[in-house]
Image: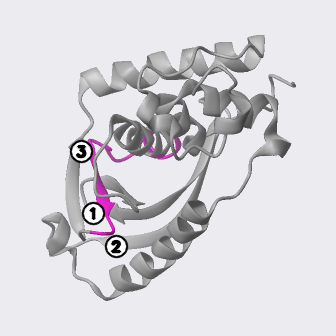
Amino acid sequence: MDQDTFTFRVIDLKQYVYCPRILYYQTVLPEVRPITYKMEAGIQSHVEAEEREKRRQLRTYGLTSGERSFNVPLLSAELKLSGVLDMLIETETERIPVDYKDSRKLGTHFKMQLLAYGRLLQTLHPDKPVRRGFLYLIPTRETVPVPFTAHLQRQLDKALVQMAAIAQAQQLPASPDTPARCVDCEFRRFCNDVL
C-alpha cells in the first residue's frame, strides 16, 4: 500500500466506527464486498431525498438564507481522507455539511461521518468556520443538528489513528461488542468467530 497516495473514504470511517472489521475487509480485501439489497435501496433513497431537497426551503435547517450544493467531492492529502458530501449549505458566515441517512436511528457512526465531512470542508476552505452539520433521516424526514464538539473531534482523531493502524498492520480486528450488528452485515460470512 502506497502511504503517500492512500486515502480513506469518509464512508470507511463510518464503517469503522460501526464495526472495525468492515474497514479491514474494505481496505485489505476491497474486491470481496458484496452489494446487498439494503445497499441498493439506500442509494435509491438518497436520489429521491435529493430531489425533494431541491424543492424545500432552508427553514428545515433553521436558516433563512444560504446556497446549496449537492454531491460535493472532497479530498485532502493532508488528512488522507476523501468523500462525496450529500449536500453543502453555505451561508455568509459558515459552511454546513448535510448527510442523508436511510435510517430511523441516529448512531455515533453517522455523527463521525458527518464530522469528517466537516473536517474536510474546514481543511479545504479555511475562510469560513464549520461548527455543525445536519443528518437528514430519510424515512422520518427528520433533520437532526449535530454540533461539532471538542469531544466528537477527539473521537474522530482517535478513530483516524486506529484506522491507519489497521490498514498498516493488515490484521483482522476483534469482533464487535454488539453482536446484533452482525445480523444484517454483508461480511458476516467472512467472520467465522461470529455466530
Q: Residue at x 36, y 18 (%)?
A: 154
Location of the N terminus (image quadrant): top right
Task: Check residue 65 in the rendering and tell me which mark sits there, or answer none.
Answer: none
Q: What element carries label 1?
A: loop
Q: Residue 91 carries which label?
A: 1
Residue 108 horizontal/vertical position (percent)? 34, 35
Earlier sequence position, callout 2 versus callout 1: 2
Q: Which residue has dot 2 on it?
A: 67
How crowded is the residue under tag 1: few (<14 C-alpha within 10 Å), some, or many (20+)? some
Q: Give the range drawn in magenta.
A: 121-139
Tell me the distance, in whole angstroms, between the alpha carbons under discs 3 and 1.
Answer: 17 Å
Foreground pick, 172 / 53: 172
Which amino acid, by three-letter code, is at mark 2? Glu
Q: Earlier in the sequence, mark 3 or mark 1?
A: 1
The answer to the question of whether label 2 and label 1 lie on touching residues, with beta carbons closer than 8 A, is yes
Whether the residues at callouts 3 and 1 have beta carbons within 8 Å, the answer is no
Q: Where is residue 57 in the image (x, y as percent from the top left)?
A: 22, 81
Look at 56% across and 19% down and name the residue there.
175
Rendered view: 114 above or below 102: above
Image coordinates for residue 150, horizontal then vertical, percent: 26, 23
Q: Is 180 displayed left or right of 42 in the figure? A: left
Residue at mark 3: 146
Nearest-to-viewer mark from 3 and 1: 3
Residue 137 in sight from this viewpoint: yes
